[in-house]
Amino acid sequence: MNFFETLHNALITDDINIKEDLANQCFSYCTKNNIETPSGFSPIVSSKPSYYDICNIVDPKELPKRNHLDTNEGLARLVHAITHIEYSAIDLALDAVYRFHDMPQEFKIDWLEVAIDEILHFKMLNSVLEDLGYKYGDFNVHQGYFDISRQTDSSALERMAVVPRYYEAAGLDVNPQIIKKLDNKRKNPMVKRIIDALYVILDEEVTHVSKGDKWFKYLCLQNNIDEQVYFDILNRYELTSKHRPHINIEARKLAGFSCNEIKQLGAKECN
């Protein structure tokens, strides 16, 4: 198979079943064959996200607050927002393999595994969304994660720092807070399904962040760069001023963060 052509087709399609099939083909091929970058290969830069034709994209400031969780529409808006994050994460993982084609084989396998996990997360949440009477694309979305992929497309180090080690790691902090907010409504079967899905995602996101941590540290070592560059990169992307009221210390430690880093991110204590 033409690995990079298949991978690119997985990246640009908005059909989740085709995306899943192509991602699985790439993963299977990658585990059995040594992937070599073709001579003269240059990754295509997409001008729009793959969900462009199925979602109405707006500025993040235009998105309403997700409340009214005692109604189907309120729950659907919450689930849709998380579903969109998971969809975006699929393409971020696929793009990492496609964009940083000179990285080791293990890197490719790791991020294809992540993409396949994120597809399952998307399908799990989309099933809940449909049972609430809605579908992916029914509510407005932002393209912030696509923009981040474009901004970091020339540096694997920055991609690993900003995407898994910042945005996905932030999910480790936020996810338990959403679960807590929903907990007193868990007698509603739909709410219980949402909570159960969030626990699955939380558990698997620790592994995803740890893969980002592994490759961030690999790139630091390869380039003889101090790992403290992480905070330099966050500063460059204006991410250090964002308030983190709840830092999931244990999950971040499991994912590879040091207590020193966790404290720099705002935690008062870390042992």
Image (tube, rainbow, N blue to C red):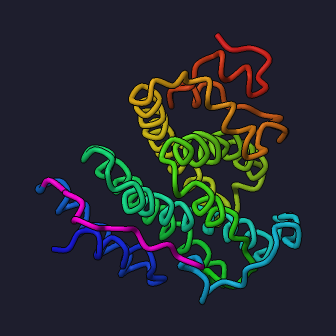
> Percent x, y for residue 107?
33, 46
Query: Residue shown at 59%/30% (left/top)?
Result: 252
> Percent x, y for residue 188?
70, 63
Asked if the magenta segment contains residue 42, the reply would be: yes
Horizontal side, residue 200 vs residue 184: left or right: left
Which quarter of the picture shows residue 116?
bottom left
Query: Residue shown at 88%/73% (left/top)?
Result: 62
Tell me the quarter of the image containing the C terminus.
top right
Query: Residue shown at 79%/26% (left/top)?
Result: 266
Horizontal side, residue 241 vs residue 142: left or right: right
Q: Against 227, is 210 above or below?
A: below
> Percent x, y for residue 236?
73, 42
Query: Residue shown at 48%/64% (left/top)?
Result: 90
- Of residues 108 and 28, which is closer to you in this image? 108
Q: Against 204, is 213 above or below?
A: above
Range of magenta residues:
34-47
- Farthest residue in the top direction? 271
